[in-house]
Amino acid sequence: MAVSRTAAMALPLLLTMVISLTMVESKFDDVIQPSWANDHVIYDGDLLMLKLDNSSGSGFVSKSKYLYGKASAEIKLVPGDSAGTVTAFYMSSEGDNHNEFDFEFLGNRTGEPYLVQTNLYINGVGNREQRMDLWFDPSTDFHSYSVLWNPQQVVFLVDDTPIRVYSNQESTKGIAFPRDQPMAVYSSIWNADDWATEGGRVKTDWSHAPFVSTYREVKIDGCEWVDGVDWESEVKRCSESQWGKEGRYWWKEKEMMMLNVHQSHQLLWARSKHMIYDYCNDPARFPVQPAECAH
């Protein structure tokens, strides 16, 4: 088949564009995929961006589900006036009785600090909110936000500093612990100006749109759930095995089952210096303190 000179000249450029696009997307493509508003999920070199404007927010989801492991994202949050916006990074199972571990980054007016809200849903029940400010500006550089989940604890970490621990007290106090529902990893950005900033008093200023959160890395180490296999067998494999096709299940080794002394000191420092709200200390909402709060 004859090819025109113009077409022949254009072909290398087209191939270069296709190869470049593939290279840009390949860093994230093995792990995640857009979950909604695909046109607001932007690849830029080695970075991925989630965009919010007055037409839509956006999000992504992991390609696999996991039962135990560690999920991390290096994120640079929306700069400037981010009031009314929420960027979330979280793990969640499915259904009305789902489990969920949330980071929610609550935007603020220019010059005012971001707040990070963490929450856990267990068997469909949430209302375990805690809020902290941070010891840095999360909009000027990339920082790591992680959830570590194993049979003994759920740990929220910021730059590997633990800021919250939910321990397994099921056998000692009968308190439910997430242990048998596989979770996917999600992130999203959306407009929440009915509650996110100063209780909804400060609204999103759309003249500053688009609002963009930028990701440098999304990493998941975990026991990858296999669909179509007997449920109890998968729970047992991920709960009891020390090795799998993913390699060594390091997140279940003895030293990962509780914080070490240094991490315990970090946790106390973060909570004493930066905690703003703790559902455990809110008698107006909980006249009887939730059982998991008692130590």
Image (tube, grey):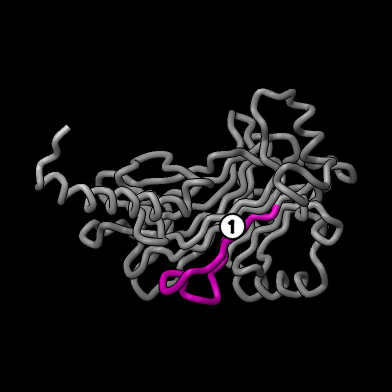
- Residue 259 position (above or below residue 141): above
258 and 9: which is toward the camera: 9
Q: Amino acid at mark 1?
A: Ser
For the point 58% across and 32% down, which residue is it? 94
Residue that numbered label 1 is attached to: 72
Instruction: Count the marks.
Output: 1
- Residue 250 position (above or below residue 3): below
Residue 51 in sight in this render: yes
Q: Please indicate whether residue 13 sits to the left or right of residue 292 in the image.
A: left
What crowding class fits label 1: few (fewer than 14 Cα within 10 Å), some (14-19), or many (20 or more)? many
Where residue 228 appears, as percent x and y from the top left, is 66, 23
Q: Does the magenta segment cover residue 270?
A: no
Q: Please indicate whether residue 66 sits to the left or right of residue 236 in the image.
A: left
Stretch in magenta:
129-148
- Residue 30 position (above or below residue 198): above
- Dividing the picture into quarters, in which one does residue 4 lie? top left
Q: Does the magenta segment cover residue 139?
A: yes
